[in-house]
């Protein structure tokens, strides 16, 4: 539980939405998705990938240090958003903790080095250090020249919000006064796309509105993958803060399978109740759902919301119809969307679920994320 509010001092992201706040908001305001077709495995997939401009930003990072040529795309993405986030923060020194995570990790390099091994029976000297999970935070710390603790982890699709939980714990313990939390995911690779296809969750929709998240009547799974990284700066200092975190919740479920979640998403019920804490249900104006676009994932989360909120269900939305499922980064992109909606007092709907009274004043927004096996996190924020 939170002993006191934790403040978000800055946020930075890179995704199909862009990297500049005004551009990101403009992309949320129009009614089109950001999906494009990508050829892989002798077929086409809908994906949300970077524009040439964003790709250029990543190339600039690679060119800034000769050692960065050996790093995975996911690490370069993390360095980019961490630089921008720290620059825009109110941090006074380099005594900064870092917690960056990823669900799939160094996907591009794993696939490249494994192909080299199959073809040649040998791999590059850089294979091991460039594909270990811990290298994502280590390189961010190297680039920023920070002095605080550095942590990496993977808790599938709730990784980003678990990084936020870790940062809050360090701040509340008094062991650190400034923390960067983030996640980075570069999953648009043939093997990763093949994995999602094997799970029978990937979208086969014909239109560009291929991820039908919050369409609770869909008859097929419609997950679409996107690449993204995001970073938040956290502290207990309210000065110039973008928003404050006033509730956190977390829970897990007993596994019945490696991808299971119960019919009523018991983990979400517990995490949402914990995050709401002593606030009344009427105090929650909107929920940004995890809603990956799968039949079971969307419905079970809705059932959990119904069980918690009864007849007082808040406004419901998700950004995955526009930017896809970015795995570890998805929860942090949802926090970014929540902050933008609070700042602009404008609710962003999905095309597939119609809310009532979308012009109501937005005061508090609840953000959900969950990973394989029911690792749920809920975060409540206000300005």
Image (tube, helix red, strand yellow):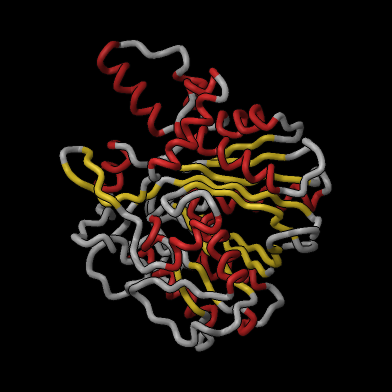
Tell me: 138 left or right of 27: right
Q: How many marks?
A: 0
Tell me: 63 left or right of 223: right
Residue 235 in view in this figure: yes
Q: Nearer the viewer, residue 73 or 4?
A: 73
Q: Residue 145, image x and y in percent?
A: 71, 29
Q: Residue 216, image x and y in percent?
A: 32, 74
Point out the residue furthest to the left here: 42
Tell me: 275 left or right of 102: right
Q: Residue 233, image x and y in percent?
A: 68, 49
Tell me: 310 left or right of 352: right
Name the residue located 43 percent from the left edge and 73 percent from the top edge. 349
Q: Nearer the viewer, residue 304 or 364?
A: 364
Name the residue located 68 percent from the left edge and 73 percent from the top edge. 277
Say if 30 sits above or below 345 in the image: above
Q: Nearer the viewer, residue 268 or 99?
A: 99
Name the residue located 49 percent from the left edge and 87 percent from the top edge. 357
Residue 156 in view in this figure: no
Q: Which quadrant would the N terminus be assigned to in this image? A: bottom right
Q: Residue 21, image x and y in percent?
A: 55, 56
Q: Nearer the viewer, residue 161 or 10?
A: 10
Name the residue located 61 percent from the left edge and 63 percent from the top edge. 379
Asked which quadrant contains residue 250, the reply is bottom right
Q: Which quadrant would the C terminus be assigned to in this image? A: bottom right
Say if 64 sits above or below 11 in the image: above
């Amino acid at each position: 539980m939170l002993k006191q509010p934790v403040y978000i001092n800055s946020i930075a992201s890179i995704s199909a939405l862009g990297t500049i706040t005004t551009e990101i908001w403009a992309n949320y305001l129009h009614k089109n998705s950001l999906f494009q077709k990508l050829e892989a495995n002798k077929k086409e997939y809908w994906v949300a990938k970077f524009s040439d401009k964003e790709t250029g930003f990543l190339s600039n990072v690679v060119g800034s240090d000769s050692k960065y040529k050996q790093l995975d795309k996911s690490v370069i993405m993390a360095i980019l958003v961490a630089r921008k986030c720290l620059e825009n923060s109110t941090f006074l020194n380099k005594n900064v903790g870092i917690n960056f995570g990823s669900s799939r990790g160094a996907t591009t390099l794993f696939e490249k080095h494994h192909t080299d091994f199959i073809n040649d029976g040998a791999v590059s000297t850089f294979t091991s250090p460039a594909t270990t999970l811990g290298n994502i935070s280590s390189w961010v710390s190297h680039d920023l020249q920070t002095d605080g603790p550095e942590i990496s982890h993977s808790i599938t699709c709730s990784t980003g919000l678990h990084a936020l939980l870790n940062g809050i714990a360090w701040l509340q313990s008094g062991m650190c006064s400034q923390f960067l939390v983030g996640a980075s995911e570069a999953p648009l690779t043939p093997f990763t796309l093949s994995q999602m296809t094997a799970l029978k969750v990937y979208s086969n929709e014909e239109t560009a509105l291929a991820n039908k998240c919050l369409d609770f009547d869909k008859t097929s799974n419609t997950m679409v993958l996107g690449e993204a990284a995001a970073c938040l700066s956290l502290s207990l200092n309210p000065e110039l803060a973008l928003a404050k975190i006033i509730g956190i919740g977390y829970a897990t479920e007993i596994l019945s399978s490696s991808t299971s979640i119960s019919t009523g998403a018991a983990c979400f019920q517990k995490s949402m109740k914990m995050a709401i804490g002593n606030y009344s249900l009427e105090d929650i104006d909107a929920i940004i759902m995890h809603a990956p676009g799968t039949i079971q994932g969307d419905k079970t989360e809705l059932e959990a919301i119904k069980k918690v909120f009864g007849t007082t269900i808040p406004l419901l939305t998700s950004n995955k119809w526009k930017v896809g499922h970015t795995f570890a980064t998805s929860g942090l992109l949802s926090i970014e969307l929540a902050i933008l909606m609070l700042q602009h007092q404008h609710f962003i709907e999905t095309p597939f679920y119609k809310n009532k009274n979308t012009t109501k004043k937005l005061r508090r927004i609840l953000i959900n994320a969950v990973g394989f096996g029911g690792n749920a996190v809920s975060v409540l924020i206000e300005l």
